[in-house]
Amino acid sequence: MFNTCIKDTFRFFFTHWWVLAVIVVPLNLMGELVRGVLAPTSVDAAQVGNFGIYFVVVMLVSIAASIATIQYIHATVQSSRLSVTQTWLLAANNFPGYLVLSLLSVLAVVAGLVAFIVPGIVVLVRISLAPYVFLLEKRSAKESIKHSWELTRGHFGTLFLGTIVLAIPGILFSFLITSSSDLTASNVQVAIISSIEMWLGVLFTVFYFRVYTYLNSQR
């Protein structure tokens, strides 16, 4: 299962790399535009408050990118045609419910950490397929988390190892940038770097989608 999902992930990513970039990069640039406007320029309380607003906006942009990417992957696998604009529209339509799902997921992870019964990392991995259940099976946020927990039973190792492997490209890129660039990079440079990082992050989305479809096919 692990080898199959990893191979299929890289195959899909490199086949559709351009479209995936066109989907997520503009959304990331929107977040970077907000960063440029709201980034604190001093330790003034109001400025620090702006940083909080920036953080929220970036989170919302990430959610939109995730929805759009999942919809594109699903449509492509189903041999359907879905334009970039259509993925953005689907992201907008599914945004409220997905936001609720994201908040519930965060609460579940935090609860796992606080209770010391189930480590937060285990909870995070076990509910990682909830977005796919929510978007593709049209279940509620609560049902999606529950179904992901059931679906991933016995497959924690595959998901965790896959996450580690797919983190390597992003880590290498970050290391390369850190070791070869000036820490006082311009806003344009920061936007380019963060866009590439978000694009590489799509690897995780593709991998979790492949695991989701694989596990569903085994049921």
Image (cartoon, grey):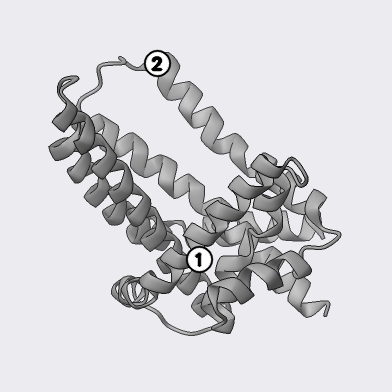
Q: Amino acid at mark 1?
A: Leu
Observer-nearest of 16 and 153? 153
Q: Is residue 120 visible?
A: no
* Quadrant of the snapshot with the N terminus: bottom right
Q: Which mark is residue 101?
A: 1
Left or right: where 92 falls relative to 172: left
Query: Which residue does the image show at 59% across and 83% down from the upper left?
Result: 137
Say few, some or many: other residues with alpha carbon within 10 Å of mark 2 (under 14 / 14 to 19 / 20 or more). Answer: few
Observer-nearest of 94 and 216? 94
Marks 1, 2: nearer the viewer: 1
Q: Is residue 156 visible?
A: yes
* Quadrant of the snapshot with the C terminus: bottom right
Give the structural element (helix, strand or loop) at label 2.
Answer: helix
Q: Is residue 76 above or below residue 5?
A: below
Left or right: where 35 falls relative to 105: left
Query: Which residue does the image show at 31% across and 48% down from the upper left?
Result: 56
Q: Residue furthest front?
A: 115
Q: Which residue is mark 2?
A: 180
Place of residue 3 in the rendered image (x, y in percent of width and height, measured from the top left) = 79, 54
